[in-house]
Amino acid sequence: MQEEKIRKTIEKWVKLEKEAKELRRSMADWVFINSQPPRIREALKYYIETGDIRRSCTLAGKSIEEFRELLRKARIPVVV
Amino acid sequence: MLREFAIADTCFLIDWARFRRRDIIFKVFRTVFIPESVIREVVSENTISWISKWLAKRGLSLYTESADELEEARLLVVRTRRIPQIIPVDVPEALCLVVGRKYGYVVLTENRGAIMATEVIEELSNVKVWRSLELLVEAVKSGVLKVDCDNPEKVFREYMEDTLHIFPRNDYSKAVAEVVRICKKRR
């Protein structure tokens, strides 16, 4: 019963994440992203792919709030 | 009706602090706790000045985590990382879940891992987790946030404009439908 609930929850989140990734990709300002230094650029791309802000911050070497500001500049939405 | 307490994590606070109607949160909750680990993650002048103003006014209150709570949060982090299909949580969000469960506080978060954890981990199933979307709906429901019933999406659009935060399509439609229902009831 519990396994079935977990399976359904995971399915729901996979769908949500698919929708979120499409939005992040389509709304992103790729000119801005590609003009960034490598560390920032790759962290922004990682965020677009995964939506994982904490790992992205670590990659970028930024605090969570600084990285959130970078996401806004890159027009990458947070979809939650 | 004013709710008692909530506890907020970093992802929630840094977006909410940019919202033009951010102070309505203190009409929904008597006190919003912020763990010390969350305060340490805040760096912008806008967020820090909003937090310090409301710490002084006692709408916000600092939450000093105990060693036991921190340990429980760490175990939760490990647990979410052991289940490959679920989105892992990190210590600051896990701590909010632990405290939310312990005291019955509403957990304010925009962290997908934290929301998912309450749906997958049995011991967290009673934790009430709200995103900004649920908070906005609650504010409308309780009359704290006045809505333009000719434009029921306006309140959500304002939030999305101020923060560049987008709500998932289904949840957004449900929230707008709820506002429409409230408007019809009040007419």
Image (cartoon, rainbow, N blue to C red):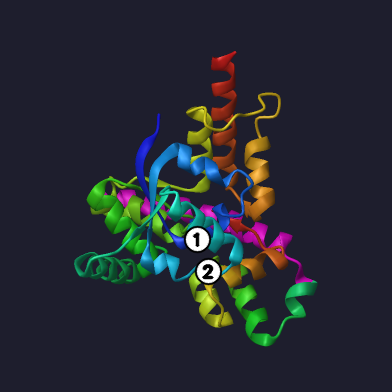
Residue B109 visible in the shown view:
yes
In this rendering, position of residue A43 left or right of residue B123: right
Q: Circle 2: is it few (<14), some (14-19), or many (20+) Cα within 10 Å? A: many
Whole-percent x, y for residue A65 in the image: 56, 68
Using the numbered discs, state the Cα–Cα distance from disc 1 to disc 2 in whole angstroms.
Answer: 9 Å
Please tell me which residue lies in front, A3 or B74: B74
Image quarter in which the C terminus of chain B is found: top right
- The numbered disc on residue A53 is 2
**Image point (49%, 43%), residue name:** B25
- Looking at the image, residue A80 lies above or below residue A33: above
Give the residue type that dot 2 points to.
Ile
Q: Which residues are magenta?
A: A1-30
**Image point (59%, 21%), residue name:** B183
- Magenta span includes A12: yes
Depth check, mark 1 against mark 2: the one in front is 1
Q: Secondary structure at mark 1?
A: helix
Residue at the spot of label 1: B11
Whole-percent x, y for residue B141 in the image: 49, 28
Tell me which chain the residue with mark 2 is part of: A
Please tell me which residue lies in front, B10 or B31: B31
**Image point (80%, 73%), residue name:** A31
